[in-house]
Image: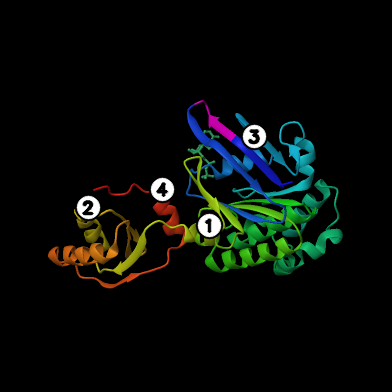
Amino acid sequence: MPAIHIQNLNKSYSHKISALKNVSFDVAEGEVFGVVGPDGAGKSTLFNILTTLILPDSGEISVLHKDIIKDYLEIRKSIGYLPGTFSLYPDLTVEENLIFFATMYKSRIKDNMSLIRPIWQQLLPFKNRYAGKLSGGMKQKLALCCALIHKPSLLFLDEPTTGVDPVSRKEFWEILGSIKQQNITVIVSTPYMDEATLCDRIALLQDGSIVTMDTPQQIIQNFAGTLYTLRTPNIFNLLKIMKHFSCNCTFYPYGENLHIIFYENTSTALPQFEIFLKENHQSYDHLTQITPTIEDCFIELTSQKIAL
Ligand code: ADP
């Protein structure tokens, strides 16, 4: 039996905004499952439904084999939840917050210290600091300790690394790896596509619908088309001109580079592209074929192809 089962979930706000459309997926026990998508994709709505905070309009949804509507109180006891917005008490100290959350779940810190020890040790020097005065990364580490202190069997992390510096983001994901070792199922949402590769499986969410769902490796393998990158001194100028390049392709800026996905044979399309660049006086270098990232896959799956 999966830890989470979702069949045809729909949710709209004020009968106008359709936040989730016919979403279906299962999360297996012990998995680290990622829900990846940009702002407004529906990630928090999904997490709020699964953690029994809001009701779906329709759908069959069970969490830890219990119905989210009938059995919501039982579900709440067995899950840990780190919401997208800072949810701790800013005017309690680090230690007081942990004691508060442990007590709320009728648990004792010493019983589950082994679960949080690697994170707690980083927080110890600040244990008497008000939670509101911690850095972004430290706040999230404390929130994770508070979500874990009753040893839940399923952990919900809604955008745990949004607004967190790159070093703390990396540390946070290392911690998630050790949580997985403790047989805790993790469902985590993120707008950062690079974090998707750290999950066992991911669902890419866009405008309330699942675009694709698989292991990150398989999603990359299923990439349709051939991806090239090039460096240019003026990406904005090149993007303007690219609209006139007639080819069955998709292009987009990727950092300071241009990425172009060819959907036709590159033995003819690539020389045509180079001629086009020369005719339009575009200087460039490093035009090379590359392996797509999850971000390329997401763009490929959601973009409008330039049809000839
Ligand atoms: P994400 O977490 O991926 O950013 P959300 O679930 O917060 O996405 O939002 C999905 C859509 O639902 C967005 O269009 C958002 O504006 C809308 N939405 C979210 N919460 C509410 C609400 N309480 N009332 C009305 N619309 C909402």
Toward the viewer: 237 or 225? 225
Q: Which residue is mark 1?
A: 163
On whether ligand 1 comes within 8 Å of the CB at mark 3, the answer is no
The residue under label 2 is which amino acid type? Lys
Q: What x and y, as percent, mark residue 260?
A: 32, 60
Residue wearing tag 4? 302
Q: Amino acid at mark 1?
A: Gly
Question: Crowding at label 4, few (<14), some or many (≥20) Cα neighbours within 10 Å?
Answer: few
Dot 1 or dot 3, earlier in sequence = 3
Which comes before the other along the chain, label 1 or label 4?
A: 1
Q: Is residue 204 visible?
A: no
Q: Could you say where residue 81 lies in the image, as x and y percent from the top left?
A: 69, 48
Q: Name the foreground residue: 163 vs 99.
A: 163
Query: Residue 96 at x, y = what percent?
Result: 77, 55
Residue segment shown in magenta:
9-15
CB-based contact (under 8 Å), mark 4 and mark 3 = no
Return the residue at label 3. Answer: 54
